[in-house]
Amino acid sequence: MKGTKKLELPGSKFAFKHFGKFAERRDFQNLRAAIVSSRLNIMSSVYISTMILYLLLAGPLAFMLVLLFELLSGLTLISPLLDAFLVAATAEVLTFSAFWGYPILKSRAIAADIEANLPFVLIHMQTIARSGAPPAALFKLVSEFKEYGEITEEFRRIVRNIETFGMSEINAIKDVILKTPSSTLKDLLSGMITTIQSGGKLSDYLSQRAEEIVFEYRLSRRQRADMLATYADIYTIILIAAPLILVIVLTIIGTIGGAVFGLQPQMLIQLCVYGFVPLLNIMFLAFLIMTERG
C-alpha cells in the first residue's frame, strides 16, 4: 500500500537465514494467516524466524543478567539460580506472547473496525451500483473515503490489484478475500463474485445485503447498549457504593478505636483508595475493551 513502511526487526536477516526453513512448518499456519491479515508488511517466514531467534536469546540472556546482578549485589529473593530461572522463564513467556499475540490482536482490531463501518459502506455501495458503475469503479470510489477506516484499505488493495498488477476484477477480489480478517467482508465479497459471474444485478445483491447487515448492526448496537447498562449497574455497586461503604465503616472503627486483621483502619483506607479502587477500575476498563473487540 502507498505510504506503508516495511516492518524491520533487528536481527531479522540473520534469523531468516538460519531459521527460515523451520518457520515454514505447518505449526505456524494460524500465526502466518494473522500476520498477513494484520498488514504488518513483513514476510510471515521472516517474522516467525525472528520470533524463534528472540526466544533463543531472551531466556539465556535474562538468566545470565539476573544471576550476575544477584551475585554482585548480594540481593536475592529465594536463591540466585532459582531467581534467574524464574526471570528467564518469564522472559520466554513474554517474548512468545508478544510475537504471537501482536498480529492476532491487530488482525482482530482491523476486523472489528471493518464490521463497524460495513453497514454504512454498503449503503454507499448500493447507491453507486444503481448508477450502473462497474465493480472496479465502485471499489475505487469507495476507497477514496478515509472515513470508512480499514474497509478503505481493503478496497484499495482491490483497486491496486486491478490497476497495478493487471488482475481481473474476480481475481482481485479473491485476493482480498484470502487476506482480510473480517468474515463478514469475506462473505460480502464472495457474494459479489457469485453475482458477477452469474450475470446478476449487483445493485440488487448489495441492497439485499445492506438490509441484512444494517438490521444485524442495529440489533448488535441494541444488545450492546443493554449490556453497557448492566455493566454500569455493576460498576456503581462494586466500584462506587462498596468502596464508599467500606471507607465509612473503617472510619467508624478508627473513631471508636480498633483494628481489622491487625491493621489500622487508616492504613486500610489508604490501601483501598490508592490501591484497590484504581486497580479495579483498570481491570474493569480492560474488560470493557476486550468485550468491545470481542
Image (cartoon, helix red, strand yellow):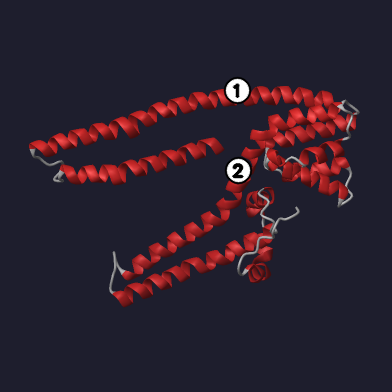
First-in-chain label (2 vs 1): 2
| Circle on res. 219 | 1
Q: Secondary structure at mark 2?
A: helix
Residue at 37% x, 75% y is 68
Quarter assignment of residue 158 = top right
Left or right of 258: which side holds 14? right
- Vertical placement of residue 239 versus 274, above or below: above
Which residue is more in the foreground, 36 or 259?
A: 259
Which amino acid does the dot numbered 2 rest on? Answer: Ala
Q: Quadrant of the C terminus?
A: top right
- Vertical placement of residue 139 versus 212, above or below: below
Q: Is residue 127 visible?
A: yes
Quarter assignment of residue 171 = top right
- Vertical placement of residue 74 versus 20, above or below: below
> Looking at this rendering, what residue extends furthest in the left direction?
257
Which amino acid does the dot numbered 1 rest on? Answer: Leu
Whole-percent x, y for residue 211 in the image: 72, 22
Could you classify mark 2 by the number of other residues whose Cα lies within 10 Å: few (under 14), some (14-19), or many (20 or more)?
some
Which residue is more in the foreground, 178 or 210?
A: 210
Could you classify mark 1 by the number of other residues whose Cα lies within 10 Å: few (under 14), some (14-19), or many (20 or more)?
few
| Circle on res. 51 | none
Whole-percent x, y for residue 252 in the image: 14, 34
Whole-percent x, y for residue 18 in the image: 65, 70
Disc 2/disc 1 C-alpha distance (Å): 21 Å
| Circle on res. 109 | 2
Residue at 53% x, 57% y is 96
Q: Secondary structure at mark 1?
A: helix
Left or right of 65: which side holds 155? right
Total numbered badges shown on the rendered structure: 2
Residue at 68% x, 70% y is 17
> Looking at this rendering, what residue extends furthest in the right direction?
199
